[in-house]
Amino acid sequence: MKLTLKHVYRLGKICLVGFCLFFLIDLLFPFQIKIDYSTVIKDREGNILSCYLSKDQQWRFLFEDEDFNDALTKAFIQKEDKYFYYHFGINPFAICRAFVNNVIYGKKTSGASTITMQVCRMLNRKPRTYSNKLAEMWKALQMEWHYSKKDILRLYLSLVPYGGNIQGVKSASIIFFQKEPQALSSAQIAALCLIPNRPNTLGFGKNDALLIKERNKWIKRFHKEGLYNKEVMNNALKEPLDNYKRSVPRNVPHFCRRMKNKFSKPVINT
């Protein structure tokens, strides 16, 4: 069919109506984020003095600007949503592929949810139904409209589950490795990438042999996809898991408690 100015005009009208409808619904039902973070008290050099559970008794540390590093963010994006920087909250091609596999072929397929959609799900946990999936997609569009990609990634890295009451990459890295995110090794990053999808089976201490097997598989895959060079891959494959649940820092308790009561925010620099 030949494309005429009449067709272009009609298409333009449809797009305009769609945008106006989006803005109207977004105005009537605004996207809101309410997260209760744990409290972290730091000294003047930026070292953690003490940590406190959130009000809902979770270890949920805010992922700060200083926690971002290329190795960690690239690994999570490569595994979870390699087109994260190119889509608008949903990936139509991945959704269509999952729909065909699930409905037509009866195969359970993962990977259709973008990082943005996963954040929406973690902010408002509900049973996985088709209606809730549609709601996630709408919320993802709203989130992409109101937040930058870095802010969305920050939310994702602050909320991903690691089993029990541990949420977020920073919480997991401090509790299990006694390191802040920027100091993690390539092997530790690979392990932290895996657990959020299967925290009940791959969580630290659940089945370490299985976790090492899956970790090594993804280390090799990251090498194949260009994230890790050969030397990094070989060193990561040899690295022991070396994880166990450690206590969070509890230094100068009276001073830190006073600071927590005085300043109500996720990170308190003294």
Image (tube, rainbow, N blue to C red):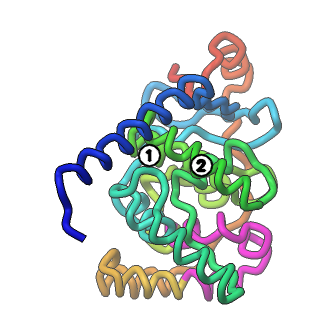
What residue is drawn where x is 63% and y is 50%? 136
Residue topped by disc 2: 119
**Is residue 100 found left or right of 79 in the rendered image?**
right
Of the 4 image quadrants, the one containing the N terminus is: bottom left
Q: Main secondary structure of the magenta part?
A: helix
Residue topped by disc 1: 67
Please provide percent x and percent y for residue 67: 44, 46
Crowd tier of the residue under label 2, counting other residues whose Cα lies within 10 Å: few below 14, some 14–19, many 20 or above:
many
What residue is drawn where x is 63% and y is 14%? 263
Residue 41: which quarter of the image?
top right
Which region shows up in magenta? 189-215
Q: Is residue 170 visible?
A: no
> What's under tag 2, amino acid-wise?
Val
Q: Are marks 1 and 2 in contact (CB under 8 Å)?
A: no
Residue situated in front as seen by the camera: 112 or 17 = 17
Measure the alpha-carbon separation of dots 1 and 2. 18 Å
> What's under tag 1, amino acid-wise?
Asp
Q: Is residue 191 magenta?
A: yes
Residue 70: which quarter of the image?
bottom left
Q: Is residue 261 visible?
A: yes
Q: Secondary structure at mark 2?
A: helix
